[in-house]
Amino acid sequence: MSEEKKQLRKLIFARRKEASDQEIEEWSRMLFGQIREMDLYKNARRVFVYMDYNHEVMTREFIRGCWEDGKETAVPKVNGKVINFYKITDFRQTAPGCMGIYEPADNDAIGYRMADHLADDWEDALFIVPGVAFDVNRDRCGYGGGYYDKYQEIHREHHTIAVCFEFQIVDRVPVTEYDIKPKMLVTEKRVIR
């Protein structure tokens, strides 16, 4: 199973490298444009969203949009073997962390203390989930750390929307009993429910 996922990750990472920065930006904008039109988004008071890295679906513009739309927004930080979500209102409240991915960080200069902004109790938040590969059944292959599955195992109430580019959809994603399907999958071209 894990060998199959390893090969799948390799394939998708190669495809991500082939895409231009311009394509990644444009597709990300199209994708999040669809999400911002959904009632699910419009009715959400709070949003959990990852910070993109290395040609993933880009999230910064979406996060800015959430702030503009008056939504409380939280992003993840890796703490040992788990992730926790912290509210941010400014990108200066983040810094490169695990694997160089931006995550919440204390910033004395602007008076931001992570401990005051833990958002794990936002059980009503709309949850934007990343992934490496997906299939049309919404099966998901993540990065291998199991962070999102472990989080969702405990926090089951979120409406989860996984985001990916069309080239990340494959015929079949191998799954285990620990893998949790997002409730919806959105690409730059379609919504899969």
Image (cartoon, rainbow, N blue to C red):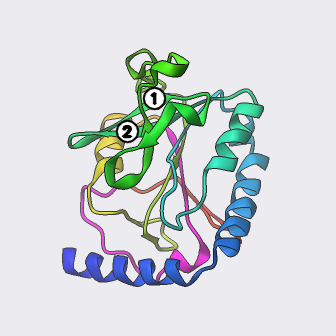
**N-term-proximal mark, 2 vs 1:** 2
Q: Residue at x 48, y 57 (%)?
A: 130
Q: Which numbered circle lies on residue 45? A: none
- Which quarter of the rendering shows the C terminus? bottom right
Task: State which region is magenta.
Answer: 158-180
Q: Is residue 167 above or below residue 120?
A: below
Q: Nearer the viewer, residue 127 or 89?
A: 89
Furthest-front residue in this view: 109
Question: Is residue 73 within the magenta segment?
Answer: no
Q: Residues within 10 Å of mark 1 (few under 14, many from 20)?
A: many
Q: Where on the picture, by quarter, is residue 42?
A: top right
Q: Residue at x 48, y 59 (%)?
A: 53
Q: Residues at badges 2 and 1 in contact (C-beta under 8 Å)?
A: yes
User: Which secondary structure, mark 2?
Assistant: strand
Q: Residues within 10 Å of mark 2 (few under 14, many from 20)?
A: many
Q: Residue at x 37, y 38 (%)?
A: 77
Mark 1 = which residue? 86
Q: Residue at x 69, y 37 (%)?
A: 66
- Callout 2, which amino acid? Lys
**13 on left or right of 190:** left
- Callout 1, which amino acid? Tyr
Residue 96: x %, y % from top left: 42, 46
Residue 20: x %, y % from top left: 63, 78
The span from disc 2 to disc 1 (Cα, nearest Å) is: 7 Å
Mark 2 = which residue? 77
